[in-house]
Amino acid sequence: YEHRRILLISQVLTAVLSLLLAIGILLNAVGIWLLIAWAITAGSLSALGLPALSAILPRLIDRRAMSSAVALTSSVWNTMRIIGPAAAGLMIAAIGIGQAFFVTAVGFALSAFLIATLRLDPLERRSEDGTGGMLEGLRYILGHRVFLATIGLSFFTSVFGMSYHTLLPIFADDILDAGSEGFGFMETAAGCGGFLGTLAMIKLGASRYAGPTMVVAAAVFGVFIAGFAASRDLLLSMILLFFASVSSSMYLNIGMTVLHTLVPDELRGRVMGVWSMTWFLSAVGGLPASALAEWIGAPLTVALGALSVSVFAVLMFVIAAELRRLPAVDSTPRAPVAERL
């Protein structure tokens, strides 16, 4: 299916879903099970639209500006990680929960309108017999070690490396004795680090030594998070989370740039779909991390998960020669720029 159409459907349905929730809240008709059903549906729509959004990006810009474009897109997420919860809280306090979801619905409706104005060059269609689909994307990833390494890093980061985020309240309350205020400080430090790492990618790009930079940043991320797990001082923990987020932002931005630049247009949606799945697995990874923390403790659980990212990065660098010889991703030939209204 055309990427723009998929994204448009996702945004329109999310706007309608948010509007229905707002009406239900104002009518006092929303219970816990209805809210859970809403969350599942909204998450499914997000999972539907995110790969399409990723696949559209290279069709809008010059390939030589890809790393900056990816970093700018990531900066939106990191910025919202810092100010989004505060803005939402202020909005709820000022106008109420139901009214705030009306604003959410309007935002998604505006997004749908803007997407509807895009005009994209048509892509070559493959697998007309219907035998390709997701399996074709998986076969392509498994057949190219550089993509296997890139998506594998995202998988290990989401499932194991980000387990610290699920267990962060335990560190704030039981280990650092910092309470909710300390929890907020650590979240802010991580968000600021991610934002700085994104700015570094905008400034430096990924044109030289992209493969080694990605591996080193991933390995350092694991070491920083392991250090955080061993820390018993709030300030030191904040510093370690800050630098861990800088490094993770750098190698994940490089990974997404590699995928956007080197994957063929006709397979980009499927490959980016697999990439997106790794991020949605971060919530799933919190369950085994919590169970393991009950057995061996939160610090050791977080340290083992983080160091697994480092080990995987080094292993991929050793066995995947393509990763060591990664081409300069900012100097690939110019791609057609889409016409935009």
Image (cartoon, rainbow, N blue to C red):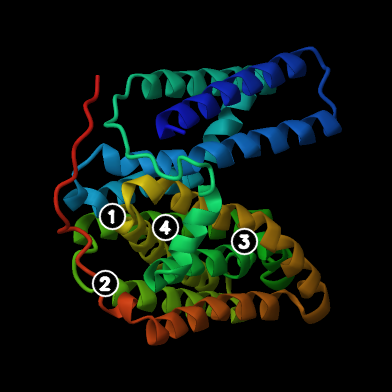
How many numbered badges does the structure rendering display? Answer: 4
| Circle 1 Cα neighbour tier, 10 Å, few/some/many (<14 / 14–19 / ≥20) | many
Query: Which one is earlier in the sequence, the residue at label 2 or at label 1?
Result: 1
Q: Specify which label sits upstream in the sequence, 1 or 3.
A: 3
User: For this view, does 99 lie left or right of residue 341?
Assistant: right
Q: Is residue 124 above or below residue 166?
A: above
| Residue under the point 56% across and 69% down | 156
Mark 2 or 4: in front is: 2
| Residue that carries the numbered disc 2 in the rendered image | 326
Among numbered discs 3 and 2, the one appearing first in the sequence: 3
Point out which mark residue 261 bears: 1
- Residue 27: percent from the left, percent from the top? 79, 12
> Residue 165 — which label?
3
Residue nearest the viewer, comparing 227 with 267 = 267
Q: Are marks 1 and 3 in contact (CB under 8 Å)?
A: no
Most foreground residue, 284 or 82: 284
- The residue under the point 52% across, 33% down is 87
Q: Quadrant of residue 180?
A: bottom right
Residue at figure coordinates x 41%, y 66% from the top left: 147
Looking at the image, tell me whether mark 2 or mark 4 is earlier in sequence order: 4
